[in-house]
Amino acid sequence: MFKTLFGLLLVALIFTSSLGFTVNKVKNPEFINHQVREVNLYGRLSANLPNILPDELFSSSPFAREDFADILTSAVDSQTFYAFTDKASVAYLNWLTGETTNLDFSYDLASFKVKAREKAVDRLLSKYDNLPTCNDKQIKAWGTTEGLPSCKLPSDNVRSNDIAGLLGNQVDTVLATLPNELSAKESPALVDVRQNVINVLRFVKLVWGITIAILLLYLVVWRRRAFLSLAFIFLLTGLIEAAFSLIAWDWVGRIVIDLLPSNSSPFLPLIVDVTTAVLEVLKRSLSSLSIVLLVIGAAFLLLWIFYRPRADHSSVVTTK
């Protein structure tokens, strides 16, 4: 009876350890960065950028949403974007998992603003050059304080030489609404999340330690007789994990998706895509672990078969 309870405890511990090993992969920034690229986050974000941009940017902007989105995409290529996400994921994950004590992350936007200004001015000049030439009445009322003018100045007008500067002033006004630097800030909600993550990781390590200790104890106490029991334990756990990854994991995935903020945020589809990709990789990882457990179970079964005849023969000789 005691051995049976011990075995059931080991099944639960090995299964929990496997789940912990699977979930533990998420703490690796390289894993997250790979998934971000796998779902083509840059391409998805670029396509949805017109819907994501805040309305405040267009209150005094000479650009339509699509124009502004194109300018931002031109100023930030995929390499720059993923360099930013790589740096952010390292900073946040190391802090959330307790690897670092301070959330130290900042990203200078100076070079981005320079590129964005250049692209924006070029876009405005291109549109300006396609405007009809102003008549005398229009010249008197001509101005570039808000948006493009209704016509372009004749080439002999003195102000026509400073069009790039006048349009650049409008771009500067828009860019001034953007921060010069992106930096991470610790909020009470984030601190609570961090503590929960640290507690989960500590629990996972505790389960690993207990599992290894009990496995060793099992072998020390029952020795060769433990091989058959351990074979059944690992085979049973492997089958449970295989069934869980094939059936129950999709249910877990739906629960995780449902826990995401159910608001109308334009970022939500992107978050769901990344989360779904991560869950799919974790599912495959758990499936692989189930195969490993089945192989270990088969190995213990072979050990039992190999040692059993010797044990039986030894007992027969002793009896005689």
Image (cartoon, rainbow, N blue to C red):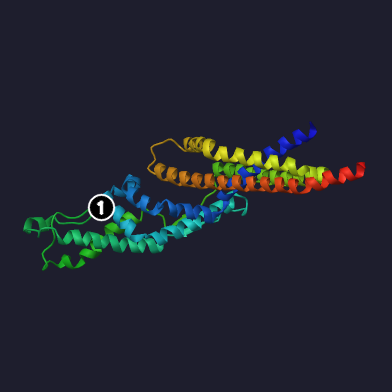
Seen from the viewer's position, the closer of residues 152 and 64 is 64
Seen from the viewer's position, the closer of residues 12 and 277 is 12
Q: Where does residue 136 sit, x and y in percent of width and height? A: 6, 59
Under circle 1, the secondary element is loop
Residue for point 92% across, 41% down: 319
The reply to whether residue 183 is visible in this rendering is: no
Seen from the viewer's position, the closer of residues 241 and 84 is 241
Residue for point 63% across, 43% down: 200
Q: Is residue 194 left or right of residue 148?
A: right
Residue for point 54% across, 54% down: 29
Q: Where does residue 159 sit, x and y in percent of width and height? A: 17, 65
Q: Which residue is mark 1?
A: 63
Residue for point 39% across, 54% down: 42
Tell me which corner region of the image, top left, top right, bottom left or bottom right, holds residue 234. top right
**What quarter of the picture does the C terminus occupy?**
top right
Q: Is residue 313 left or right of residue 104?
A: right
- Number of numbered labels in the structure image: 1
**What quarter of the picture does the N terminus occupy?**
top right
Q: Is residue 155 left or right of residue 265?
A: left
Q: Is residue 2 left or right of residue 34?
A: right
Count residues near mark 1 (Cα–Cα under 10 Å), then give few for <14, some for 14-19, many for 20+: many
* Above or below, 122 relative to 279: below
Q: Residue furthest top?
A: 1
Q: Where does residue 224 sit, x and y in percent of width and height? A: 80, 46
Q: Amino acid at mark 1?
A: Phe
